[in-house]
Image (cartoon, grey):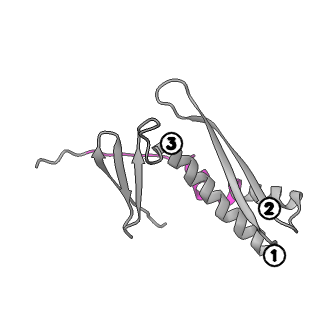
Amino acid sequence: MSKRNVTVRMKADYEYESVNPQGNVVQIDMYDAPEKKAQSPMDLLLSALGGCASVDAVLMMRKKRKTITDFYVEVEGNRNDGTPAFYTDIKLMFTIVSPDAKEEEFIKVVALSVEKYCSVASSLKSKISFSAQVKRP
């Protein structure tokens, strides 16, 4: 079993920064437009899911020796009206631009990617535990 970790640090009440051990930084904010400068945590969840599923789908299509001119996934999440405003369902619409890919094979690849190989999709079913501590300055 391997572990991953990030540290999320407050910059201001509605602004945070997430850093992994390699020093890669992601800005996070909870502002509404037009003050919004970064994705919200819920946006990042959709981005992580779309990114994870995309990598697997592209690699599988490349393994099939298909030419990929463009590739993208549109991710849409519907949220609960109450608190917490969790996603009740998430839809992914994958598009590949390719002169030699067949729709049937791409649909199979996408299904494998989302249902079997995408770690983020599987993580949405995982057990979450937490702890807390107070440090004095």
Task: Identify the residue at horizontal 61%, vertical 39% (top origin).
Answer: 77
Q: Residue lying furthest front in this view?
A: 34
Q: For this rendering, which residue is in front, 101 or 70?
A: 70
**Residue denoted by label 3:** 42
Q: Which amino acid does label 1 sit on?
A: Arg
Task: Identify the residue at horizontal 82%, vertical 59% (top origin).
Answer: 106
Instruction: Find the distance from the CA under tag 2 to the CA under tag 1.
Output: 14 Å
Say which quarter of the image contains residue 68.
bottom right
Tag 1: Cα neighbours inside 10 Å, few (<14), some, or many (≥20)?
A: few
Under circle 3, the secondary element is helix
Say if residue 126 shows up in the picture: no
Q: Residue lying furthest left in this view?
A: 137
* Rendered view: 79 above or below 114: above
Q: Specify whether residue 46 is painted magenta.
A: no
* Rendered view: 80 above or below 39: above
Q: Which of marks 3 and 2 is nearer the N terminus?
A: 3
Q: Residue lying furthest top in this view?
A: 82
**Residue denoted by label 1:** 65
Q: Earlier in the sequence, mark 2 or mark 1?
A: 1
Q: How many marks?
A: 3
Q: Where does residue 71 sit, x and y in percent of width and height?
A: 72, 61
Q: Where does residue 61 sit, x and y in percent of width and height?
A: 77, 68
Q: What stretch is highlighted in magenta?
A: 114-132
Frontmost of labels 2 and 1 is 2
Q: Which amino acid does label 2 sit on?
A: Val
Can you tell which mark lies on residue 97? 2
Q: Where does residue 76 sit, x and y in percent of width and height?
A: 64, 41
Can you tell which mark lies on residue 113? none
